[in-house]
Image (cartoon, rainbow, N blue to C red):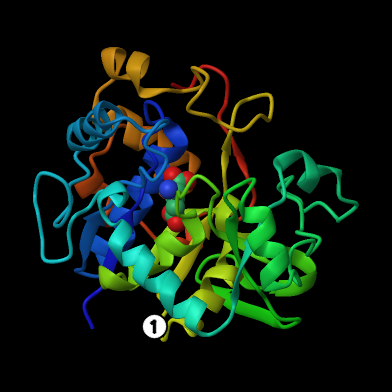
């Protein structure tokens, strides 16, 4: 079976070194197996992800030499490649889940969610306390007069696990560690978890390569694959890049954004340094993505978060 990898950025700002490392690993992991790469723009949150950011990202990726076989500007059989244009597919998947009786309306406000004494996940998200889980149809109809509901998926008290291609075995008890999760927000925006599963399956993706911050989304996604009767891809999660003082990179601050970097570096300089940090370039010498293919090996990539030394870029 042909390998199909995908890069699925959310264009809420200029891409940073962490996103570039992700794009590089997606590209190398797929290309090394003779596979292809899909670019999908995860712009569900259209207010935060204007089209010009996506276009800038596409331009940055081309400049870096990380090309794609299907996606914006290239086309392909499984488009459109902007999630904001794919809502009919998410709606259809939601309907399937509703027909199984697994979806319920949730009227909790953000403040109520956070005030609940439910445990917090490591990522700061609250495990949903189940407040709206057992509302009667009458109670729900009454509440809906005041406020449009979000939609949640009812999850079972079950352990869902998998073996990550890079980080090894990982599992969660869906009810305890994750809770009933959002499928659609109260403003009608579909949730990442649903959209990503629908799209990866529809686009024939066979391997998902992404940052370890999404490792704990995977059991939820595997559960959705199962409910929707879809075949899950193989997953590879890689460690996060941190600033020299140990902070997460973010699109909102200037941390290692590509704007300044692109003026003072070549693409090969940036990729060579990233590959060095990620263990598959013996030194920080400049290398194109093509040149890195020979040395890339998941076994060389660290499993712990990586700090970017001061002054490297
Ligand atoms: N759009 C997500 C992000 O930029 C990535 C989703 C994924 O790779 O599954 O963080």
Q: Quadrant of the N terminus?
A: bottom left
Q: Could you tell me which residue is drawn at 33 percent across and 61 percent down?
A: 29
Q: Could you tell me which residue is drawn at 67 percent across and 63 percent down?
A: 140
Q: Is residue 194 visible?
A: yes
Q: Quadrant of the C terminus?
A: top left
Q: In the image, 153: left or right of 14?
A: right
Q: In the image, 86: left or right of 208?
A: left
Q: Could you tell me which residue is drawn at 56 percent across and 78 percent down?
A: 223
Task: Find residue 166 and report its horizontal and vertical position in percent.
Answer: 53, 65
- Which of these two is toward me, 62 or 96? 96
- Which of these two is toward me, 235 or 277? 235
Q: To which residue does mark 1 refer?
A: 231
Task: Find residue 198 and report its horizontal and vertical position in percent.
Answer: 37, 68
Q: How many numbered discs, if any?
A: 1
Q: Could you tell me which residue is drawn at 43 percent across and 32 percent down?
A: 17
- Which of these two is toward me, 10 or 234? 10
Q: Indicate whether 123 appears above or below 57.
A: below
Q: In the image, 259: left or right of 144?
A: left
Task: Find residue 95 and report its horizontal and vertical position in percent.
Answer: 42, 74
Q: Is mark 1 within 8 Å of ligand 1?
A: no
- Which of these two is toward me, 116 or 199? 116
Q: Residues within 10 Å of mark 1 (few under 14, many from 20)?
A: some
Q: Indicate whether 308 appears above or below 189.
A: above
Q: Indicate whether 191 appears above or below 247.
A: below
Task: Find residue 54 and report its horizontal and vertical position in percent.
Answer: 27, 34
Judged from the image, the secondary structure of the residue bearing numbered disc 1 is loop
Q: Is residue 282 visible?
A: no
């Amino acid at each position: 079976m042909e390998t199909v990898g995908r890069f699925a950025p959310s264009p809420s700002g200029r891409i940073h070194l962490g996103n570039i490392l992700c794009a590089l690993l997606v590209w190398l992991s797929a290309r090394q197996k003779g596979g292809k790469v899909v670019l999908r723009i995860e712009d569900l949150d259209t207010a935060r992800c204007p089209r010009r950011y996506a276009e800038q990202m596409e331009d940055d990726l081309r400049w870096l030499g990380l090309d794609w076989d299907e996606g914006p500007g290239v086309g392909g059989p499984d488009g459109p490649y902007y999630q904001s244009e794919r809502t009919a597919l998410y709606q259809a998947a939601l309907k399937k889940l509703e027909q199984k009786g697994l979806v319920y309306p949730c009227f909790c406000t953000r403040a109520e969610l956070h005030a609940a004494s439910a445990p917090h996940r490591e990522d700061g998200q609250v495990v949903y306390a189940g407040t709206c889980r057992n509302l009667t149809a009458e109670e729900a109809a009454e509440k809906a007069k005041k406020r449009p509901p979000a939609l949640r998926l009812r999850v079972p008290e079950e352990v869902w696990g998998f073996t990550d291609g890079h980080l090894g075995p990982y599992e969660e008890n869906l009810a305890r560690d994750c809770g009933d999760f959002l499928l659609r927000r109260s403003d009608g925006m579909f949730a990442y978890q649903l959209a990503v599963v629908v799209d990866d399956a529809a686009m024939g993706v066979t391997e998902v390569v992404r940052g370890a911050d999404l490792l704990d989304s995977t059991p939820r996604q595997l559960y959705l694959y199962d409910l929707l009767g879809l075949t899950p891809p193989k997953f590879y999660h890689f460690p996060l890049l941190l600033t020299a003082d140990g902070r997460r990179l973010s699109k909102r601050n200037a941390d290692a954004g590509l704007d300044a970097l692109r003026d003072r570096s070549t693409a090969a300089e940036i990729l060579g340094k990233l590959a060095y940090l990620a263990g598959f370039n013996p030194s920080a010498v400049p290398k194109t993505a093509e040149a890195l293919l020979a040395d890339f090996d998941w076994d060389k990539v660290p499993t712990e978060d990586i700090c970017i030394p001061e002054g490297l870029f």
